[in-house]
Image (spheres, helix red, strand yellow):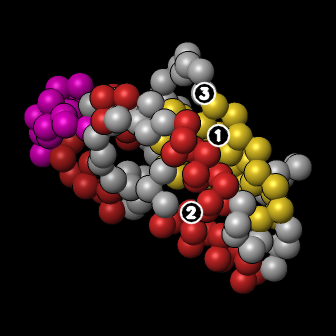
Amino acid sequence: MLDEIDSRLLRALQKDAHLTAQELGEVLNLSSSQAGRRRQRLEAEGYITGYTARLDPPKVGLAVQAFVQVSMATHAPDAARAFTRLCDTRPEIVSAWTLTGEADYLLRVFCTDLGALNRLIHEVLLPHEAVARVQSQIVMDQMKPDSPLPT
């Protein structure tokens, strides 16, 4: 269970993962050693799964973001594993979810341009033996950036 201090610590780290133990201590009204131990405990218990840098997609040459819905032709376990492996090997696919409803998977992809998105769909996804249908939605603008999880 998380107490209020743990929740505040997680909120602070989601805003700035570079906070030192001393800075966390100041935010939490704890000593730096207490704040550091709490962070280590939350890491060890799996509440904090890692630290990453957020990049600006256009600045690194990724001009197109899309969501791609994939409907499967078969739901055999081997086919699902093969499709999962495919998703894991494609750097354009930055996240993937299994869904209820009409589509079986939702993929979030970043590509350099529309041609790259077209190739991903027509040369990689659609030829996969387990895929029946693919539908894509190109992101025009992201009005709310990815935000921290509520804690």
Relative to residue 60, is residue 92 drawn left or right?
Answer: right
Q: Secondary structure at mark 1?
A: strand
Residue segment shown in magenta: 17-34
Give the CA separation, mark 3 to mark 2: 20 Å
Count residues near mark 2 (Cα–Cα under 10 Å), then give few for <14, some for 14-19, many for 20+: some
**Residue type for callout 1:** Phe
Count residues near mark 3 (Cα–Cα under 10 Å), then give few for <14, some for 14-19, many for 20+: few
Give the CA separation, mark 2 to mark 1: 13 Å
Relative to residue 89, is residue 19 drawn left or right?
Answer: left
Q: Secondary structure at mark 3?
A: loop
Marks 2 & 1, CB-CB < 8 Å contact = no
Residue 60 in which image quadrant: top left
What kind of secondary structure does the magenta stretch mostly adopt?
helix
Q: Is residue 125 magenta?
A: no
Name above or below for residue 49 compared with residue 64. Answer: below
Marks 3 & 1, CB-CB < 8 Å contact = yes
Q: Which residue is mark 1?
A: 67
Q: Position of residue 123 (x, y in %)?
A: 62, 60
Q: Position of residue 1 (x, y in %)?
A: 50, 51
Residue positioned 25% across, 55% down in the render: 40
**Residue type for callout 2:** Cys
Q: Position of residue 91 (x, y in %)?
A: 44, 56
Q: Is residue 30 magenta?
A: yes
Residue at the outermost right position: 102
Give the CA separation, mark 3 to mark 1: 7 Å
Q: Which mark is residue 87?
A: 2
Is residue 99 visible in the rendered image? The answer is no
Marks 3 & 2, CB-CB < 8 Å contact = no
Count residues near mark 1 (Cα–Cα under 10 Å), then give few for <14, some for 14-19, many for 20+: some
Pick whichever of labels 2 and 1 is earlier in the sequence. Answer: 1
Q: Which residue is mark 3?
A: 139
Q: Secondary structure at mark 2?
A: helix
